Image: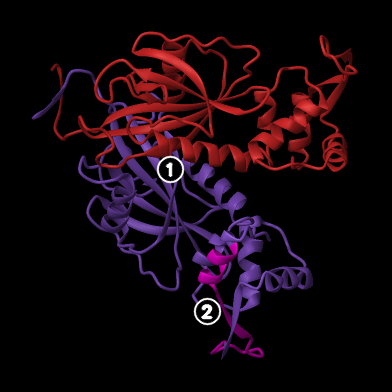
Chain colours: A purple, B red
Amino acid sequence: MPFSYEYARPALTVDCAVFGLDEQDLQVLLIRRGQEPYEGRWALPGGFVHVDETLDEAALRELEEETGLRKVYLEQLYTFGGIDRDPRERVVTVAYYALVKLSDHKVKAATDAADAAWFDVNDLPELAFDHREIFEVALARLKGKVRYQPIGFELLPRKFTLTQLQRMYETILERKLDKRNFRKKILGMDLLVALDEVQKDVAHRAARLYKFDDRRYRKLVKQGFSFEI
Amino acid sequence: MPFSYEYARPALTVDCAVFGLDEQDLQVLLIRRGQEPYEGRWALPGGFVHVDETLDEAALRELEEETGLRKVYLEQLYTFGGIDRDPRERVVTVAYYALVKLSDHKVKAATDAADAAWFDVNDLPELAFDHREIFEVALARLKGKVRYQPIGFELLPRKFTLTQLQRMYETILERKLDKRNFRKKILGMDLLVALDEVQKDVAHRAARLYKFDDRRYRKLVKQGFSFEI
């Protein structure tokens, strides 16, 4: 035990709720714990913060080590400091949420995690620690934020149809949107670039593809523009 | 050094940006540091998290110890984990922001802090550590949130005039609001109770006093209501 301090210190971890969107559902990435406590139970990926890395670095490192994910959209969520949230000792965890394009990413289990898999957010297994609560806070943040910032695009392929875009909002917000109003609103913000491309490999009439113009968005924000769906 | 661990641990602190509103300005509460590092420099109140208290408890305890403040509106802001933010060693801090009714509170310096005082947010002295950055994030959160949640009432006396209410929003948002529109909007939400009382000790015609109906607000929120100014 080479590290000694005058006062007791909580251990510090990061945990991450990673969201992805498939054709039907919003999904969250869980790892099956390979060791005690809660061995065999599903949990959010995460682990201890090293003394020489920032919190963001720790979150990215743990995600890659446990799930193979890299280059995700990551944002700090909230820090959970309940006294008894870990049966071993006092552990404070800085929680993050991340959004990934499922189309781009393969997930693999690695190191500490015995297994990693995507779960429908409406059908989660029992989670280790207070990870259910962390997940709920992350989901609420996503639902709240997706309407006022264009973070939802992080869940879509880089090129998407307006139908895919609408379905993304409908899935996260859990309600139907009127197609005509939705298109008027989203196209009215002038943040989408219509591409000279259409969908491939679809049975129905191929729809036009669009991409999100991040550079234009940042320019508009500087001028006082507010995104809103 | 009686506390030993297998791996090095960052120290964990809480820091708090406390806002108050006087007749003219938005103010933030600072303490003058009584010890190194940054001895004599102004800083946000805060200190080390004890291993047997939650983060909220630590923030409330430090506030009371350093400034005498109790019963404030407190909310977790963000956790700052830069590698070199403290010259002594790695320190991760969970930052909070708090809102207080200046009318109710007397501030006194205590324990670690040599001095405590309110400063106009537009005229701050140089701050210790990364506290300027923490303050900026707290101020941005306050400005963003005050329009969509009725937290601004935490800054006003329990009984207030509509003019005081409007001035509170104008001060925080740093822009003039149209009086007629403002009153229509705020009274239209039906969250204010008009009291059978008027201002005392004023030279001009005494204005009616109102209070915020928190119970009604919570009931409306459950029915899907969104506050917006």
Q: Secondary structure at mark 1?
A: loop
The local secondary structure at tag 2 comes to loop
* Closest to the observer, B68 or A114: B68
Looking at the rendered image, the disc whose residue lies closer to the viewer, 1 or 2, is 2
Q: Find residue B10 and report its image quarter.
A: top left
Q: Does A207 lie within the magenta span?
A: yes
The three-letter amino acid code for the residue at tag 2 is: Lys
Q: Visible in this render: residue A150? A: yes
Q: Residue at x 67, y 56 (%)?
A: A174
Q: Magenta segment range? A: A199-220
Residue A172 location, quadrant:
bottom right
Residue B191 x %, y %:
81, 30
User: What residue do we see at 72% from left, 73% from top?
Assistant: A183
Task: Tell me: residue B222, above or below residue A72.
Answer: above
Q: Residue furthest front?
A: B203
Q: Looking at the rendering, in which quadrant would you find the N terminus of chain A?
A: top left
> Which residue is denoted by mark 1 in the rendering?
A127
- Characterize the local packing of mark 1: few (<14), some (14-19) or many (20 or more) Cα atoms within 10 angstroms: some
Q: Chain of mark 2?
A: A
Local packing at callout 2 (Cα closer than 10 Å; few below 14, some 14-19, many 20+) is some
Judging from the image, mark 1 belongs to the subunit labelled: A
Label 2 belongs to which residue? Answer: A159
User: Can you say which quadrant of the picture contains the C terminus of chain A?
Assistant: bottom right
Front in this rendered view, residue B127 or A95: B127
Residue at 65% of width from left, 40% of height from top?
B174
Type of the residue with mark 1: Leu
- Residue A80: x and y in percent read 42, 34
Task: Judge whether A105 appears above or below B214 on screen.
Answer: below
Res B144 quadrant in image = top right
